[in-house]
Amino acid sequence: MNKQDVELLRTALKSHGQSLTRARLTICEALWDHEPQTMRQLIERTQGKVNRASLYRTIELFEKLGLVNRIYIGWKYKIELSDTL
């Protein structure tokens, strides 16, 4: 992610009364320019930077704000960034 992309994320979060935290930025960077990922893949990619509970809470927030989409594949799902960023 470049500085302009980070500012887009910051603006999107701020418009909903949220702030850009290090964990949120790390998770967004893990999703940026990648294929849709499972939660397990995200946990592995952010290991040591974001704990599991924060990851799940952040993905839930991003879904609520429309920043990510959940793609169902049978009873499993993958997460991808939406086109709003």
Image: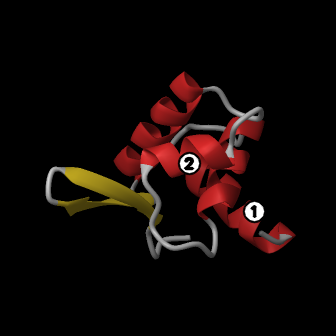
Label 2 secondary element? helix
* Residue at screen point 67% across, 65% down: 8
The total of numbered circles placed on residues is 2
Q: Earlier in the sequence, mark 1 or mark 2?
A: 1
Residue 15 seen in this snapshot: no
**Relative to 82, is 45 above or below?**
above
Q: Nearer the viewer, residue 80 or 84?
A: 80
Q: Badge 1, how many Cα within 10 Å: few under 14, some, many 20+? A: few
The picture places residue 44, in percent across and down from the top left corner, at 62, 44
* Residue under the image location 63 percent in, 68 percent down: 32
Classify residue 64 as left or right of residue 16: left
What separation in Å lies between label 1 and label 2 (alpha carbons)? 22 Å
Q: How far across and how far down the image is residue 1, in percent?
A: 77, 69
Q: Nearer the viewer, mark 1 or mark 2?
A: 2
Q: Viewer-proximal residue, 43 or 81?
A: 43
User: Relative to 52, is 26 above or below?
Assistant: below
- Give above or below for 2 relative to 50: below
Residue 85 seen from this side: yes
Where residue 5 appears, x then y in whole percent?
Answer: 73, 70
As drawn, is 46 to the left or to the right of 76? right
Query: Amino acid under label 2?
Result: Leu
> Mark 1 sits on what residue?
7
Find out whether the residues at labels 1 and 2 contact each other: C-beta distance under 8 Å.
no
